[in-house]
Each structure stands twice: as C-alpha cells, then as structure tokens.
Amino acid sequence: MHPTLRTLGRRIQLTTKDTNKGYYKGNRTGSMGSHTKYGTYKIDYNKVRTYVVPDLEGFQLTPFVTRKLEISRGQYEGYRLGPLSGEHYLKMWKAENGDT
C-alpha cells in the first residue's frame, strides 16, 4: 500500500466536509475539566474562566437607551425621515439627553 501523492507533500487540514458523521472540530474554547472513566465530566476550577469587571463608578459613556423613554406605538406623524432613520434617532437622543 502506497500513500497518494497528495498526502506526501504536505499535511492536509481536516475539515468537517472531508469526513462523515461523528467528526466535531470544536471552536477553540479549550477544556474546563476532564472525562472520567465512568463517563462523567469533572470540572477543574483552575481551568474555569473568570472575568474581572472593572469599577464603572464615574464612567462617562452611556448606553443608547434613555431612561426618559415613553412607549408610543404606531405614532409616526412628523417624522420627515421615517420612524427608523438613524439621523432622526440621534437628533432625538441629543434633545432628550443633552451632549453628555
């Protein structure tokens, strides 16, 4: 038995399209534990990702949602650019929240 010429020169990347059922490539997230011989999964808490959230006290940026919002459904009169216009939204945002 001889290898084909295609596999002699370089390593071919294995993709899910090259194989049949049962091949799962993964998404590079890494493992957070290990499988036991009994078929269960044991989590290693030294491998678990923890995210440090910075202190946001005095943070200057605000989300694009105002706390003064009044729900008005279906009332679009007076919108020259349409109800979903980004330009109109930014004008309303500056009018309600100022230049913060």
Image (cartoon, helix red, strand yellow):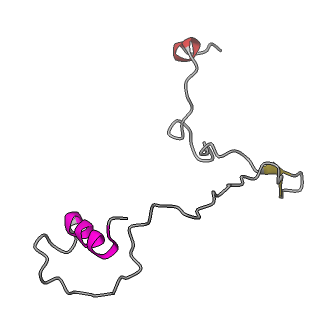
Picture quarter containing residue 42?
bottom right
Query: What secondary structure is the stretch in magenta mostly built from?
Result: helix
The magenta region covers 86-98
Residue displayed at 63% across by 60% down: 55
Q: Residue furthest right?
A: 37
- Nearer to me, 23 or 20: 23
Across and down, in percent, residue 41 comes to 82, 56
- Nearer to me, 17 or 60: 60
Across and down, in percent, residue 52 comes to 68, 55
Residue displayed at 55% across by 28% down: 13
Relative to 38, 27 lies left or right = left
Relative to 33, 56 lies left or right = left
Relative to 68, 84 lies left or right = left
Picture quarter containing residue 75?
bottom left
Across and down, in percent, residue 60 comes to 47, 61
Query: How many numbered discs sit on the rendered protein?
Result: 0
Residue displayed at 58% across by 20% down: 11
Q: Is residue 43 above or below residue 5?
A: below
Q: Is residue 93 magenta?
A: yes
- Nearer to me, 1 or 17: 17
Which quadrant of the figure contains the N terminus?
top right
Q: Is residue 95 magenta?
A: yes
Across and down, in percent, residue 40 comes to 83, 58
Residue displayed at 30% across by 76% down: 96
Which quadrant of the figure contains the C terminus?
bottom left
Q: Is residue 23 above or below residue 64?
A: above
